[in-house]
Image: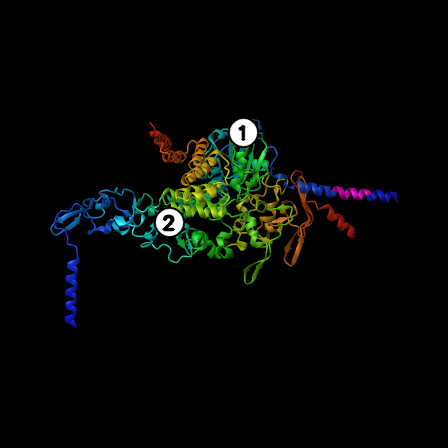
Amino acid sequence: MRQFITALLIVIGLISYAFGVEKPTTEQDSCITEECHVEHTSKEIIHDPVSEGSCEACHESVDVKEHTYKLTDEEPGLCMQCHDEFTKKFIHGALEEGQCKQCHETHSSDNKFRLRAKTIGEMCLQCHDVVENATHVHGPTSVNECSLCHEAHESDYENRLTMGPDQLCVFCHVTTKEELDELDFVHEAVRENCADCHDPHAANNWKMLRAEAPDMCFGCHEEIQAKAQNSKQQHNVVSEQGGCLKCHTPHASSVRHLLASVPTTLCLTCHSEPQGVSINEILPAFNEIQGKAYLHGPIQEDDCSGCHMTHGSDNFRILAGAYPEGFYTSFEEMKYELCFGCHENTLVLTPTADDLTDFRNGNQNLHFLHVNKERRGRTCRACHQTHASNQPKHIRMSVPYGGWKDLPINFSKTDTGGFCDPGCHLEKGYDRQTPVDYTVKPERQLHEFNELF
Amino acid sequence: MIMKTIRNIVAALAILLALSSVIYGAASSSARRIQQGETMPEFSAVDTAGKPFAYERSSGHVLMLAFLSSQQKRSQKAIEDINSVLSDIPADKLTSLQVAFVMQNVDNKEFIASIQKDSPVGVQIIGDENYKIWGKFGVIVTPTLLISDSAGKVLCVKPGHAYDFSPVIKFKLFQALDIPNGISPDDASSVRTVANSTMPAKAKRHLQMAELLASKNRVSSAVEQAQRAYEIDPNSSEIALMLGELLCQTGKPQKAVKLVSPLTGRSDREKARINLVMGWAKRQLDQLEEAEKFLQEGIRQDPTSPRLRFELGRIYQKHNDSERAMQTYVQALQLIYPEEST
């Protein structure tokens, strides 16, 4: 058997020799003839020197008799003899390594640019699998149009982008550009690079986000993450999937904080219905401002965040600052941090005032009188309904006082002052122009007292 | 009986009087703070640099008066917004604007210096330790911002630093200074955001991709993108024309004619593009006479289009009229390279 195989190989060798083309041993007019190297011109797109028969542009003879040749230079120097050198900042890795042939056929190809693959996209895919079974793919990537965004050889922009990252995306996303130009508050990431949040090729998240909100957002907004996750009082929605986008728009808004809508509208999207705060607490539906004549300033301005920290806070009801929960408290300035965020602290620090407040009897500051007490100072909530009421200065109709749910306030206002006839004390008036003499007992009370007897 | 009736009438009148005083009281309850539409009170003061400040309605100046606190985050953010809005005001309008910040605690020199350094206009800072100016305008919170027009009418009273502080003061200030800003009064405090997922936005994206691909000579891919845009928005003449041109480029004249012939064109330039596609396609269909008419009409409508002249040149070439063909090609090139026309 072994002898048979040996004989067969000898016969095959002899036949091949008989039919094979002999290498020329002298200089030839052309390398490409019917017998030799014809495959180099058999395809549609032919390298210019090949089609011109100028093989010597790239090859030089080593030994004519042996018909051995070598390249006139090594890659990429060889290619650079005719093709311009790369001068831009970012050059394709393959080129830097001198691997022009990694993408291009040197003699001829059936593909445009003599690519080794049918399209640029297919060519790129051989090394760059940017999709990897992703569920959401960018339009140009899905149709293999890599060169829409990338230069194949070199560019002055990182990742060999065809334009700066601030221009590239909006070249196609024109509507976004038009809207961005019109809006005053633009997300910093949008100004700098859309790819900070979006994977420009493909991702497993909606809109090709690199991650979903809030994780995506927390990547930069660490202080918000800390607030949302470490605060004693957390706004649950922030940490929910997609949480940030329930209130914020990701690209730009006509208002601060990239709000997606008017704050009260956003808040009432959830808070018009009862909301579970914890297993033990359900926050009732917020409807106390409806139909009310006098609204607290922030409510009037549709701005719940005037008092509430929307991400989380260490104060109850995620308030922006400390605010006493009860009817009485010993006065300390720190306890009213929330109110002093907008109102002057002198309101309760000075016993007399002229222009600071209207709640004064002559120049006796009645805010000071009620609030600034070592023991049992009245808190703001003792007289003011926090969100809204039907009385001027959003004064309460009544206030819970221990077991008494509706201790009445009975407030009425005059041009120069007002009256209160609350459950706390006898009727007292105040007048900025003609101060009431508090040493005299109120007349009405005397009459009532006399009528009893 | 008569006495009883009189007593009842008196009692009714007394009740009515009492009620009216309550109603009046309620109506005037918000009177402490100056209201929009009222007349801005005149006042004068000396600023922290010792320079006098006087607001007189007769001066014809627009006044921006901000009540701020040097110790409050909200006031600091309000100052950022105010500076941003002021930096958008054209220089020629700044001469008719007076800006003053009223504050307590003006001894915070560092803060005062930073305000003056960051402000794009000259701001006078007025100390109001005894709340005199504060009381004159009925301010109860900081920040509060007032803007009055050149006639001294209050245009804006904005207490607090709410979400719409910046757009509202910008709108009101521009209104007072007579600067067009293209925003309707209703939009000033409305919230507008980027809405890039509308159908026209999607169609435009594909159209732009088509243009980019065409510029890279990737015509067949460009056709695919333009077709997608057309599927999304078949009523857009811009898309139909782009697709029509690309169909001509890829040798599909019948499809181009079918697509573009129903279009009428709203401007001369658009009409010229329609004529270009029609002429281009008709030339490919060998209907040279018709093609020439379309292209001549197109050149009349848009004499700056090189492509129209190039296509016309090709018709002359087909007629073996080499002289006119050459002339027309040269005209096309002159439109592309005007500096080299000599």
Instruction: Find disc 2 in the rendering and name its residue.
Output: A145
Q: Position of residue A188 (x, y in %)?
A: 43, 45
Q: Residue at x 16, y 70 (%)?
A: A4
Packing grade of label 1 (10 A; few <14, some 14-19, many >=20) is many
Amino acid under label 1? His
Quadrant of the frame with the C terminus of chain B: top left
Q: Position of residue A426 (x, y in %)?
A: 69, 49
Residue A30 appears left or right of B281: left
Q: Chain of mark 1?
A: B
The magenta segment: B9-17
Q: Could you tell me how far apart the alpha carbons at marks 2 and 1 are, in whole angstroms? A: 58 Å
Amino acid under label 2? Glu
Residue B116 - label: none
Q: Position of residue A437 (x, y in %)?
A: 68, 42
Instruction: Find disc 1 in the rendering and name its residue.
Output: B61
User: What secondary structure is found at the residue carrying circle 2?
Assistant: loop
Quadrant of the frame with the N terminus of chain B: top right
Q: Residue at x 76, y 48 (%)?
A: A447
Vertical order, B259 against B325 (above or below) = below
Q: Is residue A154 visible?
A: yes
User: What secondary structure is found at the residue carrying circle 1?
Assistant: loop
